[in-house]
Image: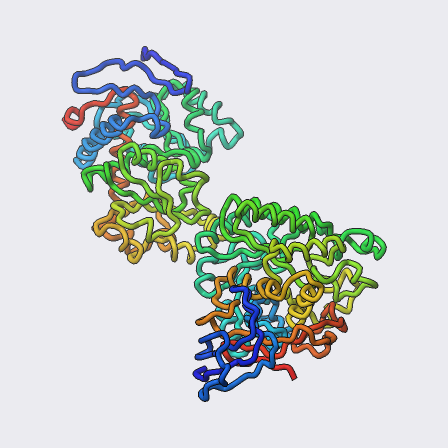
Amino acid sequence: MGVDVVVDRLGETYSEPLMTSSAATPFPHRHLLGIEYLSPDEISALLDLSDAYVDLNRRPEKKLSRMRGRTQINLFFETSTRTKTSFELAGKRLGADVINMSVEGSAIKKGETLIDTAMTLNAMQPDAMVIRHSDSGAADLLSQKVNGSVINAGDGSHAHPTQALLDALTIRRRLGRLQGLTVAICGDILHSRVARSNIQLLNKMGALVRVVAPPTLLPAAVDRLGVEVHHDMVAGLKNADIVMMLRLQSERMKGAFVPSIREYFRYYGLDRDKLAHANPDALIMHPGPMNRGVEIDTEVADDINRSVIREQVEMGVAVRMACLDALVHQELVSPTEARA
Amino acid sequence: MAENIAFTNARLLDPASGTDIPGDVLVKNGAIADIGSLFANGAPDDCSIVDCGGHCLAPGLIDMMATLGEPGREHKETIATGTQAAAAGGITTVVASPDTRPIMDEIALVEFLDRQAQASGVINVLPSASITKGMAGTEMTEIGLLTEAGAALFTDGYRSISNPQVLRRALSYASHFDALISHHTEVPELAGDGVMNDGETATRLGLGGIPNIAETIMLERDLRITELTGGRYHAASISTSESVAAMRVAKDKGLRVTCGVAPYHFSLNEYEVGHYRTFTKVSPPLRSEADREAIVAGLADGTIDIIASHHRPEDPEAKRLPFAQAAYGAAGLETMFLIGLELYHKGQLSLLDLLARMALRPADILGLPQGRLARGAPADMVIFNPDTPARIDAAAFQSKSKNSPFDQRPVQGKVLRTVVGGVTVFEAE
């Protein structure tokens, strides 16, 4: 491939672009580990390209050739339905050969370390590795050991950058902007990588971010992340443009973090009454999978005018196509060219 | 109570305003309508008159911790007998401990207690709920919903939450609802098989000892957790000089922490165990004389906020056992005030300060309008003579249980009348 690999001291590696067409802009990142490495302009450009891929994905003929001959390995150490499927479709629609590896049946089960697995897979020359892992920093570690691109599909409670990008795309397509919007992220902030990545992205793009949760579900010093902190849903949702609900895992609602489902829903579940305090046209988002009757009322989740939860899933495929495309080529093709 | 009642010829004692003057109280519709020298020319005709005979009239006492037996322990106490005992002791509001069967950890149980209190209680009964489900010390209860249902505070009774993470999360969670967490502080592993204070007496008696550090380590742990989480923390019952010192430090730091003591911790020491007197088996245990003196000093300087009865009724079968096997706890509703008056008679606490520890501070901690003689406040009052010589007679208790370590103790003071919402609920013969 003849790629010049540059490794800086932070371990973030990138390579010189191989070719620059007139219609493409450089995207000097080899990995997508978190939102912190992206500039606002790069985020906007990724969303522009994603927009083009949304259009393509709505055509009957969806196959492109931008990743023809490239190999993508999806390495999922945590169970996942939508993210894995989304990344698989994204790679395939770009023409890549996509391999799914899950922990079941892998050498990990036999005691192999993450690095050994990575080195083994790396020897097979993949161009992109998509990793999900229950430990924060796993994607980072992997990126230090492989030659191809690493995309973080969720590591522990740390980051889920493609989720933040697809959320941003969903919002931008509905409301036309991110700048100046008030976004309330509600629920289990403590354990949420989605929340952390969204806080970073939305702050970079000039949105006002609030977190709303009981004190037990907020991490220490969360206010230092540049968010308004609320323990009360009514105050937290007041005049919000976006209400982003997070999943509360069932083992966390039996008394350790919150007393019960009943109490959690009463104070933190999104229902009509609480939603009434947000802006009248506020959008409802959820990264899925939803716990109906725990963090969100069915009536609200299925409100076709307000809930964009299904749209988020559609945007996911397009965003992941844009990310794979940009990382593998280290450039962002212009949306017009991508559509052609 | 539409009736107007004039309480005349009283010595008015109000810890909130520091008042100690002769005067009268006019009660209308169950609330205090006026106070002061009201009836120099006789009470108005539309009033019934209670002549206080120059005796003390003070806000009714508020007891932040008493076991009332219902549901599930009705053979030891009921709300009817418990509140009658409380009334006889000058208490007008009591927080019912959640150590019932089943344990008060569900909304339905709090509502049940409320209904029982309305039906058979003669004074105000405030339900409390456990901090953890089944008081198992692992999973927090529905602190928000239980607060809405009327739980005045949260406590695991005489059990301590040994897992600090559980207490941390409970305090943190409760802070959003401004709920009060009241905690019994004793490291179970350090208490071990101890049944009385660790030391010479325990050694001579061959009984297992509970060292002071069992209490103070957990208290200091709790205070540090509260410093991290915020929220309102109350150490239910402290007994050691080290605990008083720890509370003093925490209060100097400005933490929202309070603490209470039981009457036996400022009036008795470990020698009272004598020859295995199981009525002196209490938790935390009776401590050394130096600890007792430190508790008195803590009460005097305000480090210790409140005195609660820690009424823990036990039937004879639970106490007529070898010391190690006997149940913990002492009946305390009827003796709390009389034992408290000893502090006054010894010159360790003024009457007003004693009333602050037993009425005003508990009211403030619980957010109640009671605890003061003020216009508009509920007419919950106690009329007493602090000087009447008497002897405590457990056999004459209103309480179903007679397990008092103070039985036959000579005391000075007598509750003459207890009034709740303008209604006399106890009157001495």
How many numbered marks are there? 0
* Horizontal side of residue A289 vs A24, given as left or right: right
* Residue drawn 27% across the image and 29% down it: A92
Q: Quadrant of residue A65?
A: top left
* Horizontal side of residue A274 vs B170, given as left or right: left
* Residue drawn 75% across the image and 57% down it: B195
- Nearer to me, B101 or B39: B39
- Nearer to me, A261 or B152: B152
Q: Residue furthest bottom?
A: B45
Instruction: State the scheme by which the image is colored.
Output: rainbow
**Residue A79's spot in the image, x, y percent?**
41, 39
| Figure quadrant of the N terminus of chain A | top left
**Residue B378's spot in the image, x, y percent?**
48, 73
Q: Is residue B169 above or below residue B387?
A: above
Q: Residue furthest front?
A: B41
- Nearer to me, A24 or A244: A244
* Horizontal side of residue B415 vs B121, given as left or right: right
- Nearer to me, A312 or A79: A312
Q: Residue furthest right?
A: B204
Q: Is residue B348 in view from this perspective?
A: yes
Q: Is residue B97 in view from this perspective?
A: no
* Horizontal side of residue A95 vs A259, given as left or right: left
**Residue A111's spot in the image, x, y percent?**
53, 29
| Figure quadrant of the C terminus of chain A | top left
**Residue B12's spot in the image, x, y percent?**
56, 72
Q: Is residue B140 above or below residue B352?
A: above
* Residue drawn 68% across the image and 77% down it: B397
